[in-house]
Image (cartoon, grey):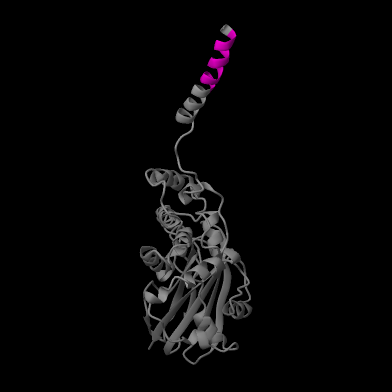
Amino acid sequence: MRQKLELILIPVIIGIFLIHYQIFITPDEPSSIDNPAQQIASPPIVSENRNTQPPVVSTHSAHQAQVIRVGYEHESSEVSWYTLGELYEQDGQLPLSLEAFSHVCQTHPTAKKRIKALLKNKRYAIVEKDNVFNSDSLLVLFDDERRQALEHRLSDCDLDAIVPPQAPSECETAKSDDIKTQLKCLHNPYAPITVSLWLDKRGKKQFNSHQKVTIGYQINGLKKGSVAYFTLLNVSPSGHLAMIFSEPIEVGKIYGQLIEQSSVATVKQINLETGQEYFKAIGTIEPIDWKIFIKAAANGKPPVKIWETVELMVKVK
């Protein structure tokens, strides 16, 4: 009798245990595979597949993303990418923000507007004060495969619906041997550095031909005190193209003014011709042969990865 009772109790006990395990141990939560937002902490994926999952974000943003996910277990990948774009922008990682918004710009009108704002005046590539782009942001700017994937997605965003199409510019129709036009059109939309140029003082645009002017310049965006290279070119009113000078300079330092802390200061001065003078400064992280650089950059193959330009036009009486 006792043996029969034991045989009956054993499966009953096992059944109670399994029910307990099912109710209290296994949570009724959606699979991370069903929720694209759960993939935020996954390694970044470089692909042109528009259905790739959101990449890794910074520790601070990842924490924010975890909080945002509460109550949104069934949110779509569209919302995930848009949320990531906002988080990256809050963290100052503007290239990553642009990349995230580009994944949903075809179906998300607000993402398209955010892209327009980031593209305006290259805002997405400008390092703001007290901010540094992380390595992943730099990859968006300088890794060829990743940048091309971004450009491909942006080309599918129908941004022309926001920005009216324009007629071909002089830059688009310039001949391959027209180095002066190539110089004037030289511009890097992905530059993480900024180059500044002025004559006598910032903002001054009117000069007299009988007076010498002082050249002022500066490069920012890299580690302060590191070395960059500054090349200044000029197209005179008569159309003559010439290099004024090319030299290594210290990032963050202002050149072309006397500094009280220094007993000796070197300033560069030039005479201007009557008419409109055109100046173009090129900032790079490596020394360049300016003629080779201009032709290569005009064909989309600059010999250095990090570079930027700035132009200055002044009137001379």
Q: Nearer the viewer, residue 212 or 301?
A: 301
Q: Looking at the image, which residue is at 49% across and 92% down?
A: 238
Q: Quadrant of the N terminus?
A: top right
Q: How many marks?
A: 0
Q: Nearer the viewer, residue 73 or 197?
A: 73
Q: Position of residue 123 (x, y in %)?
A: 42, 65
Q: Quadrant of residue 296?
A: bottom right
- Does residue 172 appear left or right of residue 145 in this picture? left
Given the current orientation, which residue lies at the most extreme bottom position? 238
Span shown in magenta? 3-14
Name above or below for residue 278 compared with residue 4: below
Q: Nearer the viewer, residue 211 or 256?
A: 256
Q: Is residue 10 magenta?
A: yes
- Principal SS element in the magenta part? helix
Given the current orientation, which residue lies at the most extreme front position? 1
Q: Is residue 78 magenta?
A: no
Q: Looking at the image, which residue is at 56% across and 84% down?
A: 242
- Does residue 170 appear left or right of residue 305 in this picture? left
